[in-house]
Amino acid sequence: MTEDNWRAVADVAPRDEQRAFVAALGARYLLLSMREEAWNSLAVCTDGHVVGHVMWGFDPADGAHWLGGLLIDADHQGQGIGRAALRTLMRWLSEQPDCRELRLSYHPANHASARLYASLGFTPTGEVEDDEIVTALPVRTDG
């Protein structure tokens, strides 16, 4: 994300029926990144235009890199942009020297996200955080 595109990220909005699972606007995720030091926001762009948001963080308590705040603008959904953004972020995070595991969570009723994350290799851990199912993907087992 740059100085120039944060406003476009703030305006990203999902479909109305998705608002039970994600923020109504990208602005919420930007504020979380600004106010809570754990998160880092990234713009999701295609053809030079902002079409979404994703964020990541590192939790020293569990040693995992977390992915969160994935939001693709309603007009750009169904084109594989969310999947591509996740794959790109997953690849980048997995290349970090301290990355051993990727984690994310989703609402149990969000079946589309459950299918997406499972197709990327994430499996439920049995943990629940803030009423969401926690999933994990081991990256490296070496020291």
Image (spheres, rainbow, N blue to C red):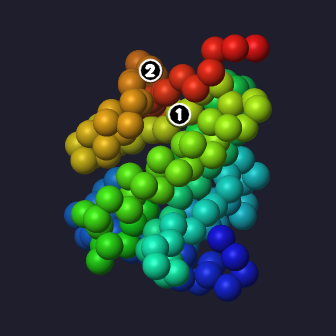
Q: Is residue 79 visible?
A: yes
Q: Residue at x 38, y 52 (%)?
A: 83
**Circles 1 and 2: CB distance less than 8 Å?**
yes
The answer to which quarter of the image holds residue 84 is bottom left
Q: Earlier in the sequence, mark 1 or mark 2?
A: 1
Q: Secondary structure at mark 1?
A: strand
Residue type pointed to by label 1: Arg
Considering the image in quadrants, where does the N terminus appear? Answer: bottom right
What residue is disc 1 on?
A: 103
The answer to which quarter of the image holds residue 40 is bottom right
In the picture, measured across the screen, residue 1 lies left or right of residue 17, that is right
83 in relation to 61, above or below: below
Task: Estimate how packed mark 2 is, as few (under 14), some (14 to 19) or many (20 or more) residues with alpha carbons within 10 Å.
Answer: few
Task: Estimate how packed mark 1 is, as few (under 14), some (14 to 19) or many (20 or more) residues with alpha carbons within 10 Å.
Answer: many
Q: Residue at x 67, y 85 (%)?
A: 4
User: Marks 1 and 2, Cα distance to the nearest angstrom?
Assistant: 9 Å
Q: Which mark is residue 6?
A: none
Q: Secondary structure at mark 2?
A: strand
What residue is disc 2 on?
A: 125
Can you give x and y, in whole percent of width and height, for residue 96 in the image?
72, 38
Can you give x and y, in whole percent of width and height, for residue 69 in the image?
50, 55
Can you give x and y, in whole percent of width and height, for residue 45 in the image?
50, 72
Q: Is residue 22 visible?
A: no
98 in relation to 75, above or below: above
Q: Residue at x 72, y 81 (%)?
A: 3
45 in relation to 65, above or below: below
Residue 135 vs residue 97, the one in the foreground = 97
Residue 143 vs residue 75, the one in the foreground = 143
The answer to which quarter of the image holds residue 64 is top right
Residue type pointed to by label 2: Thr
